[in-house]
Amino acid sequence: MCGSHALTPSEAGPGQPCGAADGRCIKGGWLMAAKLCPVPYKSLETHGTTQAAAAKHGCHKEGSLSGEGGRQDFQECRHPAVIMAAALTGVRLVLRSSCCTTVNRAISSSARVFGIKSRWVAPLYKTLKHRHIKMKSLGLMPVNKRSEFIEWNYDAELYAFSKRLQEEFDGDALREALTDASYIAKETQRQQELGVSDPGLAMNNNKELAARGETVITEYCFGYLRAAFPLLPEEGISALVEYCQSEDVMSAVGYGIGLRDLVLCEEHPPSSSTMARCFQAIVGVLSVSSPAPRCHAFVRDFVVAQLVGKDIDTIWKVENPMGVVADILHQSGRGEPEPRLIFQSGQETIQAVYHVGVYSDKKFMGSGYGETVETAVKEAAHDALRKLFQITDSASPLPFGKDADVVPLKTEANISLDNWSIDKTKNIITC
């Protein structure tokens, strides 16, 4: 019983003493505990933590530890330590009580006061996330265009796009580069359905700019790669340029620089072919509005950089590498290549390994590993070609930045694979 009061928990109001155990107010007591302690100060003897916190910073006056005076002094205290101690005390009291409905309402209210989400919030978010992933995997999740939002400003987006790339584009040419032919056809059809017999859209698609950009990319990639790999045959240079001009690389670069929401086309999201064509058109616009060195640096930083970390053997696949090595040695006046078994292990197991080396005139040319002797010989021939063409993992990296600015572009084609010999490459200076 709380003092001389005999009120039941249902009859007691917020801040009033009730008939609960230890004289604590259950109804509304926890809600008030977030800001004040609703228990009279004379009953703070049971609040050891609260009383200690109150006495520590001296919120009560001497001689007012009982009666309404002491309670009033404690209610006027706003010290964080006392507030938190009262809150923790209220939590313990509420959790011990048997009033389920009141307790749930009190816990939710206090959780909102302290910024704590209720126990049902996390399971709800998990369920919604699971539904979102499932609908997306089934193709039931609609993909909204960024231009459908109310704050969309296409002019501002184009300006921000130019500043992100630190390039100066011509505004009208940039719009044309991002306009696909399917978008013009769609707009013409829509206006005809609305009753406009002659829409007369003053818009051009990006077909011409894309062709111009493709030419710029091709010419620069050939000149740059010939200078960076002077010993690589022209067939290898062509394979690298074809890789850089592939639809996958062009579309990946376009997505990377943020063209997904800027492209005007019929489908959404844009297809890989549309994205690749728009990026080539961007290069075409840059070649018109900026000097050649600036455009070349743009192509080098975004297109040629896709070769970093790539194995040239996976891009340029040489058929019959041992035969190519034999032809090169024959044109160089050297002996035929001789594969020799250097090491083998686990011949009778499924994890067999063979180490084979290729020699010519008793000189080591390369080595390779494989699960069979034939595979090891093929890998050893590939290793010998990598050393001859100087495209090993330990070779000098591609020049970028200031190093690339001083490398002159090479317009003359490299030696073809059919005419390649060791003697012809002695006077070639590598980067």
Image: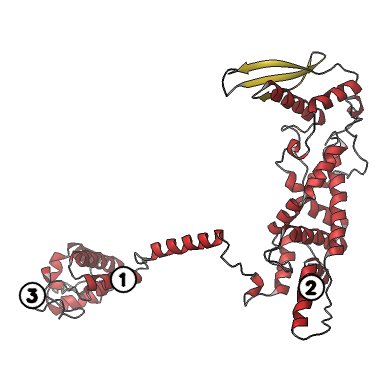
Tell me the amino acid under the disc marked 2. Answer: Ala
Labelled pair 2, 1 in contact (Cβ < 8 Å): no
- Determine whether, in the image, residue 53 is placed left or right of residue 395: left
Residue drawn at 76 percent across, 40 percent down = 315
Quarter assignment of residue 277: bottom right
Name the residue rendered at 53%, 62% in the picture: 135
Mark 2 or mark 1: whose residue is earlier in sequence = 1
Furthest residue in direction right, as rendered = 412
Q: Is residue 391 visible?
A: yes
Horizontal and vertical percent position of residue 394:
72, 32
Query: What residue sits right under mark 1 in the picture?
Result: 108
Q: Nearer the viewer, mark 1 or mark 3?
A: 1
Between disc 1 and disc 3, whose residue precedes?
A: 3
Give the left or right position of residue 18, taking residue 239 as reference: left
Q: Amino acid at mark 1?
A: Ser
Secondary structure, mark 3, is loop
Q: Say if 35 sits above or below 415 in the image.
A: below
Residue 413: x and y, percent? 91, 40
Decide which of 22, 306 is in the foreground and name it: 306
- Viewer-nearest of discs 2 and 3: 2
The residue pinned by badge 2 equals: 185
Residue position marked by numbered label 3 in the rendering: 3
Q: Quadrant of the C terminus?
A: top right
